[in-house]
Each structure stands twice: as C-alpha cells, then as structure tokens.
Image (cartoon, helix red, strand yellow):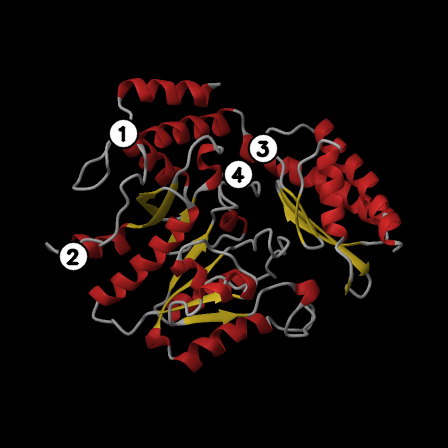
Amino acid sequence: KEIKEAIDRQLEALEFFPNYHDGFTVPQIRLADKIAEIAPGDLEVCFFLSSGSESNETALRLARQHHWANGKPHKYKVIARRGSYHGTTLGTASYTGFTSLRECFEPLLPGALFAPQVKCHDCELGCKPETCGLRCLKAVEDLIKWENPDTISAMIMDPLPGSNSGYPPPPAGYLQGIRELCSKYDIFLIFDEVQTGFGKTGKWFACENWGVTPDMMSISKAITSGYLPLGMMVTTKKIASVFNEKPGAEFRSGSTYGGHTVSCAAALANIEIIEKENLVERAAEIGQYLTKKFAELKARHRIVGEVHGMGTLWAIELTADPATNKKLDVDAGTFVRDWCWKHGMILRNNGNILVIAPALIITNEELDKVVEYLDQAIPAAIKHFAL
C-alpha cells in the first residue's frame, strides 16, 4: 500500500524528467543518498539505469573507460566465472558462463575470460575443500598471469553465485583472495548483486556476509520490490572522480529512462518499509529457520542432495545418489516444479536444482507450508520416474 501511494504521489507531482545534462529529480537525489548510506564500504556514487543487465553493462563500460582515461587502453579483457549469468545485452552475454546462453549470439565481444565456478561439493577442478588450498583462487591468478594483467579491465562475479548455480557459498578466504588479486593487478572488482541485494541474504548486500567491498556494485530487482523497473551501478568517489577532471572526460554512457522518477519514488518507499519492519534481520531469521527445515527435508528424501542458501535464497539439488553427487538422468526438477505450481506454490527450477526464494515478509507458518509441498512433490517425482 505504501509503495502504491508513493507512486501515485509522484505521478501527481512529476511523472518523469530525464537524468542527463545535469538534470536530476528529488526522488533520484534522495535515493542516491539512501543507497550511499546502506551500501558497503565507500560505495556512494550512483549511476541510474532501468535493469540489472544495464547495471552490469554500465559497470563494465565504466571500467573500460576508466582505464582508457588513465592511459591504459589495452586493459579491455573481463574475467567472469563459468556457470555465471550477468544479463541480456551483448556485453553481459559475452561474460555469461553458460554455453547455451552464448552460442546463438556468437561471435560475442572479444576478451571474455572464464575462471572456474566455485562449487565445493561439485568442484570442476576435482578438489576437496579440506585439502585443496583454494585451488580455485590460484586458478584465477594463473589466468591473470597467462593473459597478462596489463590487458585485463575487470572481474565480474556474484559474491553468492545465483540460482543457476544453486547458491553455493564461496569457501573461506576466496572472496578476500579475489579482492586482493584485483587490487594487486589493477583490475576492477565488480559484484553483481542484482539478485542478492536488499536483504535477501540477511544483510543489505550479500558481499557484507564476507566483509568484502567491490570497486563497483550492480543492483536492481528487489530495489523496488518489483513494483517498477529500476537498476543502478554504484561505485566510489575515487573511481568516479576520473570522469570529472576536465571537459570531455565525462562517463560516456546514459539511458533516457534510467532512474525513472516514479521508480525512484517506489524504491524509496520500499527501502523505508524494509528498514521500518526490520526485514533484513527477518531474512537472517528465515535463513536460520530454513537451514533446520531443509536439513530435516533432506533426511526424509533419498534424492535430495546438496542444499545451499542463506537468508531467503535457497537451492535444493535432486540427485541419484547424494553420497556421491551422482546426477539424475531424468528431469525430476521440472516435475516437482509443475506439481507445486498445480497445487498453488510458485517454484522455479534449473534442471534438477529447485530454487526457493520467498519474500522477506513470509511467515514461519508459510515456510512450513513450503516444506509440506516439497514433502509431497518429491515422493511424487520418485514414484513417477520409478527412482
């Protein structure tokens, strides 16, 4: 109700004004101040957009132009991770780590480099977390050295890998190590917080769970609670200052509807509700509750394998043998999804990974209902496929 009322008030006062040629609206200014207040570290300069894809694209563009302005035009390559997803533009598709989402658009932008995805329970390097010594981190530095750090502009990653990967948490020390590598080799670290921002992980932004601050951060999705489209790229004053040094140095990017006046009003109302109702703290409580509930669920069903998540972002992997992580050769995930939809619960899947991402305002009773649905849908899948 409060968000709708904020939208209505803004429509009456001023429905739109473009944010270029030094033109800004009051909602934009207020929202930029609020984001600077809640963002981690010294991230406080906001660039307004309309979506997560645009936000990631803009961060990559800013990194390139920054190096160019500093006399380093050869720093154009971007490191991403296999199994990552960063958007629908040609640029962000170039740095998305799924072949199926890239191949039909090739050739894509040059300079896309891919490091291993970090899934300790299913390590593509064949390592075990207790003995590997962060081999995945060493692989990133090996890649940087092989490609020549003087050619690498940025590394883009989601601090908590997204639903496509099943929210596997990074091993201890990994994100801190990535931060150190990027600083060492003059590579901008970009965190894609489009999916994980605004309380979803029990912190305002996922990276705060590991105490690591990027050079740039992309945000969208939950910034307006879905009422209207809005995106943002946030960086530091030090980085942004390069674009204010002299006439012609300005960042050469922009979007007519980026930071739409009404969207900014909706975002302000949304953030006010999150703060007033302590929903970030509530997300942390939800995470603790689901940790227990999903552990019990796993014990009840022999095809439930790895369960990963934090706050309100969770993934349950269906496997043929949880002990060995042997994959199912049937699409049980889609069966479970369809069963839940038919019975009144919206569920997403990526193959045999079930994605559970409830709202910040969900109650424990409603969470129990989620588990109840899964307790019925998973045996139905076992019976259907004779597993």
Q: Secondary structure at mark 2?
A: loop
Q: What residue is at 59 percent from the left and 64 percent from the top?
A: 118
Numbered label attached to residue 199: 4
Looking at the rendered structure, the kind of residue marked 1 is Phe
Q: Report the residue that reaches farthest toward the front.
A: 104
Residue 330 position within the rendered picture, expressed as x and y whole percent measured from the top left: 78, 58
Give the SS element for disc 3: loop
Q: CA separation, marks 4 and 2?
A: 36 Å
Q: Is residue 277 above or below residue 319?
A: above
**Residue at numbered disc 1:** 16
Q: Earlier in the sequence, mark 4 or mark 2?
A: 4
Check if mark 2's residue and mark 1's residue have beta carbons within 8 Å.
Answer: no
Give the distance between the C-alpha atoms of the residues marked 3 and 4, in whole angstroms. Answer: 8 Å
- Percent position (x, y) of residue 113? 45, 71
Q: Position of residue 360 (x, y in %)?
A: 58, 33
Label 1 vs label 4, nearer the camera: 1
Tag 4: amino acid: Gly
Residue that mark 3 sits on: 360
Q: Earlier in the sequence, mark 2 or mark 1?
A: 1
> Residue at left 54%, top 35%?
280
Sequence-wise, which precedes: disc 3 or disc 4?
4
- Specify which label sits upstream in the sequence, 1 or 3: 1
In the picture of the structure, the residue carrying the numbered disc 2 is 249
Q: Secondary structure at mark 4?
A: loop
Q: Residue at x 83, y 39 (%)?
A: 376
* Closer to viewer: mark 4 or mark 2: 2
How far, Cα to Cα, is label 2 from label 1?
Answer: 27 Å
Label whose residue precedes the other's in the sequence (1 or 4): 1
Q: CA distance from mark 1 to mark 4?
A: 28 Å
